[in-house]
Each structure stands twice: as C-alpha cells, then as structure tokens.
Image: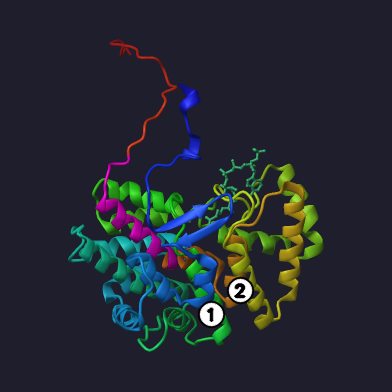
Amino acid sequence: MTEDIKKGLAGVVVDSTAVSKVVQETNSLTYRGYPVQELAANCSFEEVAYLIWNGELPNAEQLEEFVARERGQRAIDQKLVDIILGLPKDTHPMHVVQTAVSYLGAVDEQAEDNSPEANQAKAERLYAQLPTIVAIDHRRRHGLDPVAPTSDLSYAANFFKMVFDEVPADEVVRCFDISMILYAEHSFNASTFTARVIASTTSDLHSAVAGAVGALKGPLHGGANEAVMAMLEEVGTADKASAWIDNALANKEKIMGFGHRVYKNGDSRVPTMRAAFEDMVKVKGANDLLDLYNTFEEDFVGRKGIYPNLDYPSGPAYHLMGFDTPQFTPIFVMSRITGWTAHIMEQHANNALIRPLSAYHGEAQREVPTQR
Ligand code: ACO
C-alpha cells in the first residue's frame, strides 16, 4: 500500500492547535492570532512568552508579576553547575542542554505532576533557568567562571551579562530579543511534534522537552543556524559564493538556511530577522559579511527558487553579537521552550496517543529454522 505512505508526514494534519498558525499560501505566522512581525515590532520576549502560554498579551500588572517570577528563578543549583562543568569540553552544547533538562526533571518535586498548574510552573522554571545553563556552558568553553544571574535585567540583557559579563548596547539587546520572539513558536515543526509525541504517552514535561532538544539539534531543523555560519565562514568572501554554490550543488549538498517544509515562497520571519541582522552589521561595521550574505542569497535563490528560512539571517546575527557558533542552537532552545511547553500542555489537555502506522517492506512471514 505504498501509495498511502505520507513520507515525513508531509502535508498531513495530525491534530489541531490554538497556539500558532502558519499559512503556507500567504507565508504568514501568527501566535495566538497576532502576526509575529507585529509582536517583534511592539513587544518584549517576556510579553510574547506570556502570550504563548496564556493566550493573551499581559496587562502591566500581569507582566510585572510574570517578570518577577522569571527573575526570581534564574539561579540553578550548585550540583547542576558542577555537572555542566564536569562534562568534556567538546561535548556538543545541545547535549549539555539536554543533560541539564533531564537533571532538572530528576530533581523537580512536581516532575510527575501533569496538571496544568504544575506544567505551567515547570515550564516557567525551565524558561528562567535555560539561559543560565547556556551561559555557564559558553563560559566554561572559554575557561571562564560562571557569572551569576541578576534580577534587575531583562531576559535578554541578563543573558548577555551571564555570557560576557557585560551588557552590550541597547540595539544589540533588542536584536537578540527580536530573534527570541521569532524563534518562540512554529506549530508542528519536528521538535514540537517530538514533544507532543512524548507528551501523548502522558509522560512528563521534562521528558518531552529533553526529546525536543534532541530533535532541534539536527541540521535539518534548529542546527541549521550553526550550519549557516559555518558555511558562510567556509565560503569566505562574496566573490567566492558562486563557485562554492556550483560545487555544493554538483555534490548534491543541501544549502543550509534555505528551504522550508511549509513555506515554499519565503519564510514569514525572515524580513524581520534580516532587518535585525542589518542592525547588527551597522553596530559592528561588518559590511563584508553583509555583502557575502546578500551575494550568496541572490545567487542561490536565482538558481533554485528556494528561499532563506529564519536560520539564514539569525546565524550571522548571533555571530556578530559575539556568540560561539555551537551555542546558536541552545539559544534557539531558550526561545522555543515557550512554544514546546505550550504544546505539551495542549497535548495533555486533550490527549490521544500519537501512534501512526507503517507499511512493511521486509521479508514475508517465515518459519524460524530449527537447525542453524
Ligand atoms: N538546498 C538545496 N536544495 C534544496 C534545499 C536546500 N536547502 N531545500 C530543498 N531543496 C531541494 C531538494 O533537494 C529537493 O529537490 P529535488 O526535488 O530535486 O530532489 C526539493 O528542493 C525539495 O526538498 P525536500 O528536502 O524534499 O523538501 P522538504 O520540505 O523535506 O525540506 C528542509 C525542508 C528539510 C528544511 C530542506 O529545505 C532543507 O534541508 N533545508 C536546509 C536545512 C535548513 O535550513 N533547515 C532549517 C529549517 S527552518 C528551521 O528549523 C528554523
């Protein structure tokens, strides 16, 4: 029955969601009904996180309470710090994040409680603590001691402080915040679907998030922001882009940061992130990188009609902010934790075990030989 196989579940609608909507035809994306570009232009990441979980933007009082809760939970316990510091220096940063999430599940008193209240509390703790985890890992790779979180800085500014021990110019913090908003949620992408599959067994939130981290790590998904930067560094300069693309296509390689399973005429998040990247280029005077970025894009789109996805501008933007390339996908986790956990709660609230069928193409049934 091969004609019934929907390889990669392409085009299959497996459930409904109220968290976000991706409209292929118009290349648009809304979170709880609000266009993501408008959220990026008018809101902080904290407001968007609240929106994703609660369905509405917060009023001033709700935001104050929500922000205070997040700021009060940023610190991680010393045992977890020691676990991170004890991992091999070349451990993939996404393995570090996954290990930390599993540890936090192991010690969370509400770990096995799947009630909406417990899940919300656990989601908020992960949201508050993931930046601390990512920052400690970043610093240990540079042989630097952790910088403790502070409660008087925004989510984004505190992250910079914990990574670099200083807060950069407001424009840089704002570019980062925009990337957090754009990465927060994207319906049934591979990592969110992974989280929903795990949640559908009525397993716990930390287990579902740990699985989602594993799915996001791959270069066909979240790992692409790292792969984009590695690719641009390998190409080097704008004049080498065309020959590099010739060679990659001749070798049937995928060009990282281009193409999307849902958007076929451009990713709705790209114009906003591209503008943020251009702001970073201005701050850093990195015109050569912009030149390479534009030349590469024009050349590849011109040949294949395959457009950039969010990872194409976000990779070089993070590079200009000073982050190491292997940290880009963990930064994506800090944002997507909001979307993942909203979906886990939605799955728990209206659950059906996710268990598809497969078509078999192995040996026909046969007897086990008694003489071997
Ligand atoms: N480079 C070169 N060719 C491509 C690319 C690309 N980036 N993307 C698609 N194509 C080609 C394929 O080779 C295929 O060509 P063919 O029909 O001649 O064989 C055709 O376009 C369709 O591609 P598929 O891979 O079948 O399309 P799918 O919907 O499965 O792919 C995907 C989506 C996996 C994202 C793909 O475009 C890709 O691998 N891109 C690079 C990785 C990437 O940037 N991932 C990030 C996704 S966005 C995110 O996670 C935030």
Q: What's the residue at 23%, 49% (across, down)?
A: 202
Q: Earlier in the sequence, mark 1 or mark 2?
A: 1
Rendered position, 35 above or below 25: below
On screen, residue 347 versus residue 269, left or right, reads left
Magenta region, residue range: 335-354
| In this picture, residue 356 sits left or right of residue 242 | left
Spot occupied by residue 17 in the image (x, y as percentages of width and height): 37, 52
Q: Residues within 10 Å of mark 1 (few under 14, many from 20)?
A: some
What residue is shown at x 55% (from left), y 70% (from top)?
324
The one of 227 and 334 positioned closer to us in this rendering = 334
Residue 85 visible in the displayed image? no
Q: Is residue 346 magenta?
A: yes
Q: Image quarter for residue 201?
A: top left
In this view, the residue in front, 231 or 309, is: 309
Secondary structure of the residue carrying tag 1 is: helix
Q: Which residue has dot 1 on it? A: 174
Answer with the quarter of the image where residue 65 lies.
bottom left
Residue visible at 48% across and 24% down in the picture: 2
Residue located at (31% from left, 79% from top): 62
Q: Quadrant of the C terminus?
A: top left
Count every numbered label the image shows and give the total: 2
Task: Look at the image and tell me whether residue 245 can be seen.
Answer: yes
Looking at the rendering, in which quadrant would you find the N terminus? top left
Residue tagged by mark 2?
276
Is residue 200 or residue 226 the one in the foreground? Answer: 200
In percent of width and height, residue 161 lies at: 46, 84
